[in-house]
Image (cartoon, rainbow, N blue to C red):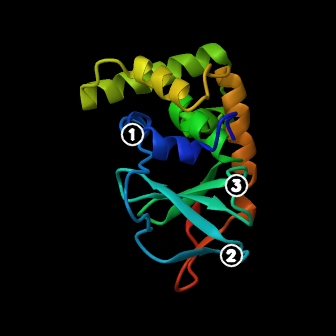
């Protein structure tokens, strides 16, 4: 939680922050009713609270008991894959905004590549370039800095710290198996 309120409260109160979270960072809290493409539940029976959508029909959920933002954040896409993307909402947003390529970085690590600060910056810059070209955004780094500031998350921590937080989130996956209403498990990862 930030010093002056929850991150979700800030997104509700600051329309510009909510618009930036939605585009270009695909964390849409502007929808009136947030639902997933199908009814889902955690295998553990713990509660799921839908908090945002992405542009492809996926849903972000806070997982577990409580009403705070210090619960793990799970992302479920519309194609049957799901995984924990942050140990809490703050870390999930930092990863979505600051290191959206964390999944690729973890994949490269598993294949033996060293993902130090320089390698992470190069990977993010490469993915940013592709995104900028596809969406014709003029200032993605500026938008990143603005949303971090508006949400009270600035300055962005080192990318190696963010990658460590991505590892911590992935480690929570086994305890957060998502099932559809027929009891079929979503693919994790």
Which quarter of the picture shows residue 92? top right
Dot 2 falls on a residue whose secondary structure is: loop
Residue 50 percent location from the top left of the image: 53, 63
Mark 3 — residue?
Answer: 68
Give residue 171's position: percent from left, percent from top.
75, 50
Q: Residue beneath label 2, please?
A: 43
The residue lying toward the viewer, choosing from 28 and 182, is: 28
Element carrying mark 1: helix
Mark 1 and mark 2: span between their CA atoms?
Answer: 35 Å
Name of the residue lying farthest toward the bottom: 182
| Above or below: residue 162 compared with residue 120 | below
Point out the frontmost of discs 3 and 2.
3
Number of labelled discs?
3
Q: To which residue does mark 1 refer?
A: 15
**How far apart in space, not on screen, are marks 1 and 3 (Cα)?**
21 Å
Labels 1 and 2 touching (C-beta < 8 A): no
């Amino acid at each position: 939680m930030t010093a002056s309120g929850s991150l979700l409260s800030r997104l509700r109160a600051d329309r510009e922050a909510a618009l930036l979270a939605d585009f270009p960072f695909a964390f849409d809290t502007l929808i009136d009713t947030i639902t997933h493409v199908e009814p889902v539940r955690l295998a553990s029976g713990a509660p799921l609270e839908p908090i945002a959508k992405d542009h492809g029909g996926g849903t972000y959920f806070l997982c577990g008991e409580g009403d705070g933002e210090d619960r793990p954040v799970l992302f479920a896409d519309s194609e049957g894959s799901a995984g924990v993307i942050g140990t809490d909402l703050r870390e999930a947003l930092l990863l979505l905004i600051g290191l959206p390529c964390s999944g690729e970085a973890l994949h490269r690590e598993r294949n033996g590549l060293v993902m130090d600060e320089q390698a992470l910056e190069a990977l993010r810059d490469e993915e940013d370039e592709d995104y900028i070209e596809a969406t014709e955004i003029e200032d993605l780094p500026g938008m990143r800095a603005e949303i971090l500031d508006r949400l009270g998350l600035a300055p962005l921590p080192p990318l190696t710290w963010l990658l460590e937080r991505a590892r911590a989130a992935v480690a929570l996956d086994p305890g957060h198996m998502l099932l559809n209403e027929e009891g079929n498990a979503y693919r994790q990862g």
